[in-house]
Amino acid sequence: MEKEKKILYSGMQATGTLTLGNYLGALKNWVGLCDEYECFYGVMDLHSLTVRQNPTEFRQNARKLYALYVAAGLDPEKNCVYYQSHVSAHAELGWILDCFTYMGELNRMTQFKDKAAKHADNINAGLYTYPVLMAADILLYQADVVPVGVDQKQHLEITRDIAERFNNLYGEVFTIPEPYIGKAGAKIMSLQEPTKKMSKSDENVNATIMLLDDRDTIIRKFKRAVTDSDTEVRYGEDKPGISNLMDIYACVTGKTHDEITAEFAGKGYGDFKLAVGEAVADELAPLQKRYEELIKDKAYIEHCIKENDDKARYFATKTLRKVQKKVGLTELIR
Ligand code: TYM
């Protein structure tokens, strides 16, 4: 059957508030894609369980993430914004795909290695099979494209490998998804250690801009950003701090690196850092305002969650039933 529109799938873990990296690498690029694609965006709460969560905070964080998606511009009437854990097909397909994934493949996942090193006291099986659940998320919706930051590329590759393996055995069951990685912002670095990815779990609060940081905090963090002893605003491997700030500034202003270099020629880093801080604060202000309104509007958010959970469940169950039949599980007797 020909699909009317191509299908797009993505999501974020429901842990803590989002960072500027999540926003510039993913969320900002998602807005507006619903004209071209049938879009599904999950609040990936099952994935978040791979790290121990405080139940009350976790529930609040999942709701916050939902509100941030909508505040950033994902209209829930036009995008299926839903909770992963509300669609049991994710866990069910995840299990089936676990049986089509090799430990050798999972052993190569760099994110597993990083997270295992960070949480040495809790290297659980979920952390290990995390990429398989992610494959299930994507394949359930027959996604053609998956917009993500660079750090998720390897997970997309394993998703494609699992899908191809399954299709070779059982026929064309899954669409093979393509990653969609934005040109700018796909890897925003820490403001304190610019050779490291900006991450919400960074212990140094000055390293990460949180989407709900207020204006003064944003500007202060940029002022403290680590640069180098030079004064030239120029993009280059030898200048990771300045290059990262240029990437951020380029993402929020739409300017090219050359235009940015020209704009700050003869000025010091102080002026540049202030300009980046102000531009980011200006970019986030409308999102933050909308978020404050939405988070209080429980009835609206809950209505959106329910409608979209139902829609997601409908699509996901269709694929799951097909897979169950293909592998030879006995059909439900009604
Ligand atoms: P998560 O929650 O770690 O990150 C969400 C999205 O933000 C991007 N990102 C960044 N982009 C640029 N610079 C950064 N510093 C930065 N940090 C994070 C990530 O690349 C991602 O696009 N496993 C996924 C969640 C997930 C998912 C899925 C995504 C679960 N199932 C299915 C797509 C499709 C994750 O942990 O994202």
Image (cartoon, helix red, strand yellow):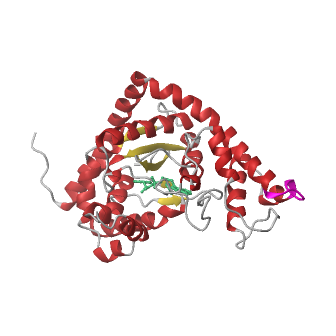
Q: Quadrant of residue 193?
A: bottom right
**Residue drawn at x 38%, y 49% as measured from the top left:** 141
12 versus 193 height, above or below: above
**Residue drawn at x 64%, y 44% as measured from the top left:** 218
Asked if residue 266 lies in the magenta stretch, the reply is yes
Q: Quadrant of residue 31?
A: top right
Q: Quadrant of residue 310?
A: top left
Instruction: Name the magenta segment's main secondary structure.
Output: loop
Q: Is residue 85 left or right of residue 151?
A: left
Q: Residue furthest right?
A: 266
The residue closer to the viewer here, 216 or 84, is 216
Q: Position of residue 85 (x, y in %)?
A: 30, 44
Q: Position of residue 277 (x, y in %)?
A: 70, 46
Q: Is residue 179 left or right of residue 317?
A: right
Q: Residue furthest left?
A: 333
175 versus 161 height, above or below: above
The residue closer to the viewer here, 334 or 97, is 97
- Does residue 171 appear in this view? no
Asked if residue 133 lies in the magenta stretch, the reply is no
Q: Position of residue 287 (x, y in %)?
A: 59, 35
Q: Is residue 306 left or right of residue 185?
A: left
Q: Position of residue 284 (x, y in %)?
A: 63, 39
The residue closer to the viewer here, 209 or 142, is 209
- Does residue 69 appear in this view? yes
Q: Is residue 279 left or right of residue 87?
A: right
**Residue drawn at x 44%, y 37% as measured from the top left:** 64
Q: Quadrant of the C terminus?
A: top left
The residue closer to the viewer here, 128 or 196, is 196
71 versus 166 height, above or below: above
* Residue range highlighted in magenta: 262-269
**Could you tell me how many numbered marks the image carries?**
0
